[in-house]
Amino acid sequence: MAENIIIRVQSPEGMKKIASTKRETAAAFLKKVAKEFGFSSNGFSIYLNRNKTGEILSQNKTLNYLNHLDPPVKHMSFHAYIRKLTGGADKGKFVALENISCKIKSGCEGHPPWPEGICTKCQPSAITLNRQKYRHVDNIMFENHTIADRFLDFWRKTGSQRMGYLYGRYTEHKDIPLGIRAEVAAIYEPPQIGTQNSLELIEDPKAEAVEEIAAKLGLRKVGWIFTDLLSEDTRIGTVHYTRNKDSFFLSAEECITAGHFQNQHANACRLSPDGHFGSKFFTVVATGGPDNQVHFEGYQVSNQCMALVRDECLLPCRDAPELGYAKESSTEQYVPDVFYKITTTFPKDPVFTFSSTLRFPIENRDALGETQDFHSLATYLSQCSSSSCSFLDIVSDFHLLLFLVTNEVMPLQDSIGLLLDAVKTSNEELAQTWKKSEQWATIEQLCSEFHRDLWIMPWVAQLSPSPLQLCGPASTAHS
């Protein structure tokens, strides 16, 4: 028999004693409190402490709160879901979050191996696709508009689609109970081939260096972004609205890619026997909205979709990649709700992890005539010499730091740690200390040579025969 207890509840109307048991659920207890005080079922809050911390939440109350937000939230946060599972009297002692497997279990000795034999012990369970109750990330926020604008510049100038990896951090989202917000501080654009309607990623020799630099800056790869934009009227800058309820939000091909990335970035979870469950990695699509302006839409595919992708059960149709089908089943099968939407926002007050107001060229944009080399570094530093920005502001650029580490003339991978710490902590004193290093002195010397050449070149052009006078700034193609 459950042990009876008395709980004292203090309110402006006075204190009341509520009879309860140690095994009673929070929902049942809240109903008793509502009845005793004459409150509506969801019109009050109870806290463990007088300073209104430690709110006692029931599943129904959390969902009611989420449904009344604007816009309504269809999925509870993952940590709220965990709290629900572990909120009973046993504190989740027997809770285990099992990862879905679509593969036959190996080691079954009662029959010949597949395809000659199979049994209920080794056969994977059938999967019924359902809406996921929770999501691992509740909001995506770009620190400022500049990050997104620089990424979109490639499409604006070429008309070709573009992809990038999002680097940032996960923080508390205070508007959602136990919610998580992903804050994007930088976009890294890997080597790729883009056209107006396709993207192909190329092997990236600098991938490990980028991860190492990001980690030292306190950042991690949190998601990926790609454009799907088609210009409608170049005079006023409008784009076509193509992704909607009458077409699709994510194509099957994109869902599979998202699932692949999410499987690569599994979410650590102590309640899972495997040590991981789901993923916080997300997808952002830059596409046309109902107002024919560029919108940023965030998504994650469900754990079920991740399992189908990992076990190679989900495939896109060859002639219609926006549609997909499950292996060994009908191509006419409808696959509902294998992804869910995340709100993507920009803050009212912009935040800048990288404070430089000048723009060092973005990597892998040779198609635009934008290159990362010592000519571009010399040009960048010459702009800084005429401004009042500090040395920390000068070097506080994600793409510049990548170049300093990965350039082939003088890579600074083994000697840039102090500078990365300075940028990470916004410490001008550390930055000035690194500025006095031999490595930076050598960089400045190289730049001065390139900068001298930049000053000589215009005079040479004026004295050259007429055919060379055609040389000048490259024209920019606009979409």
Image: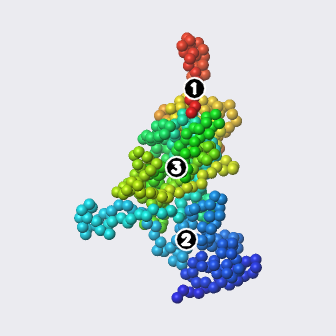
Residue at 45% across, 53% down: 259
Mark 2 vs 3: CB contact within 8 A:
no
Q: For this view, does 315 lie left or right of residue 464?
A: left
Is 314 or 122 nearer to us in this picture? 314
Crowding around mark 1 (Cα neighbors within 10 Å: few <14, some 14 to 19, many 20+) is few
Question: In this image, 236 relative to 272: left or right?
Answer: right
Which quarter of the picture shows residue 329?
bottom left
> Can you tell which quarter of the image residue 451 is in?
top right
Q: Image point 58% across, 71% down: which residue?
A: 59
User: What's the distance in space between the residues labelled 2 and 3, CA to CA?
Assistant: 36 Å
Q: Earlier in the sequence, mark 2 or mark 3?
A: 2
Q: Nearer the viewer, mark 2 or mark 3?
A: 3
Q: Secondary structure at mark 2?
A: helix
Query: What residue is disc 2 on?
Result: 84
Residue 476: x and y, percent? Answer: 57, 28
Q: Which amino acid type corresponds to the residue marked 3 in the rendered image?
A: Ser
Mark 2, other Cα within 10 Å: few <14 / some 14–19 / many ≥20: some
Q: Quadrant of the C terminus?
A: top right
Q: Which residue is mark 3?
A: 247
Is 83 situated left or right of 52 in this image?
Answer: left
Residue 401: percent from left, percent from top: 55, 40
Identity of the residue drawn at 55% across and 81% down = 23
At horizontal 62% and vertical 60% (from top left) the residue drawn is: 72
Q: Which residue is mark 1?
A: 475
